[in-house]
Amino acid sequence: MLNEILTLDVYRLMLIFTRVGAALMVMPGFGSQVINTRFRLLLALAVSLLLLPVIGPALPPLPRSQAALLLLVVGEVTVGAFLGILVQMLISVMHVAGTFIGFQIGLTNAFSFDAVAEQQSSTLTAFLNTVAIVVILASDLHHLMLRAMVDTYALLGPGETPPLGDMTETLSHLLSAAFGFAIKISAPLLAFGLIFYAALGLMSRMAPQIQVFFVVLPLQVMAGLGMLMVTLPLMMLLFMRWFEDGLVPYLVPR
């Protein structure tokens, strides 16, 4: 009897761990490569242990065949990875906005390591991504990420076939919306760049002997950074609302 109980608990724990671990390994902030791999695994295991008494009774029984168990595990990993990719897309708006802004203020060729994208990105893009993660953690929006991960058990229960078509459609629509939202939050800097380059074109026509674009480059960078400093708080407020609205559909009302 004791052996059956222990086996059942290990099965339930590992089944929860597959979904939770897949989500946390992909979610920005929790799954970043700059965080030690052992710490990320221990965090996923700790969250799974906390969820075991709550979700464990609702889990399906241990399948009798290895094929059924494999399909169950693949389904759990798919749901967890879907949620992690969804959160990645919600934060990707800052990467796209940083790229747009970098082109307008002349900082596209300055590169640094981006802890969110986990690759070399423009300095401005890496800065906006880092600020976005800090804002999420400081405002406790990461609690919504964890809550959405738990509430997926009510939306997509273990043993159910993941709706791959709906997941793909959701991600495609979110990607399109993220691109449009990135343009909106970077609109002040885009307008600045349009006006600035139009003025440079007029100056180049009036004084063709002067290398206008080369002379005013420091002014472009300084003015662009000044505009960014003024608009950054509003950008972060809009981003927080965007991030929250993106996760609310996956939360169960309480």
Image (spheres, helix red, strand yellow):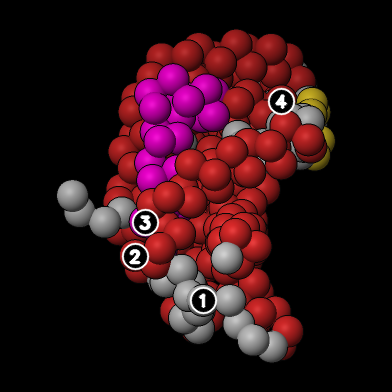
Residue at 47%, 14% (x, y): give it: 229
Q: Secondary structure at mark 2?
A: helix
Residue located beneath label 2 in the image: 154
Identity of the amino acid at label 1?
Pro
Q: Do the residues bearing badges 3 and 2 touch, measured as CB atoms within 8 Å? A: yes
Verify whether residue 117 appears in magenta.
no
Verify whether residue 147 appears in magenta.
yes
Seen in the picture, residue 119 relative to 162 is either above or below; the reply is above
Q: Is residue 75 left or right of residue 152?
A: right
Identity of the amino acid at label 4?
Thr
Magenta-colored span: 131-153
Please tell me the numbered disc located at residue 151. Answer: 3
Q: Do the residues bearing badges 1 and 3 touch, measured as CB atoms within 8 Å? A: no
Residue 172 spot, x, y in % from top left: 50, 70
- Going from N to C along the chain, the mark reached first, 1 or 4, is 1
Please tell me the numbered disc located at residue 123. Answer: 4
Picture quadrant where residue 96 is located: top right
Residue neighbourhood size for the residue with mark 1, other residues' Cα within 10 Å, grouped as few (<14), some (14–19), many (≥20): few
- Going from N to C along the chain, the mark reached first, 4 or 2, is 4
Identity of the amino acid at label 3?
Asp
Q: Secondary structure at mark 1?
A: loop
Residue 178 spot, x, y in % from top left: 46, 53
Q: CA distance from mark 1 to mark 3?
A: 20 Å
Q: CA distance from mark 4 to mark 3?
A: 36 Å
Q: Secondary structure at mark 4?
A: helix
Identity of the amino acid at label 2?
Ala
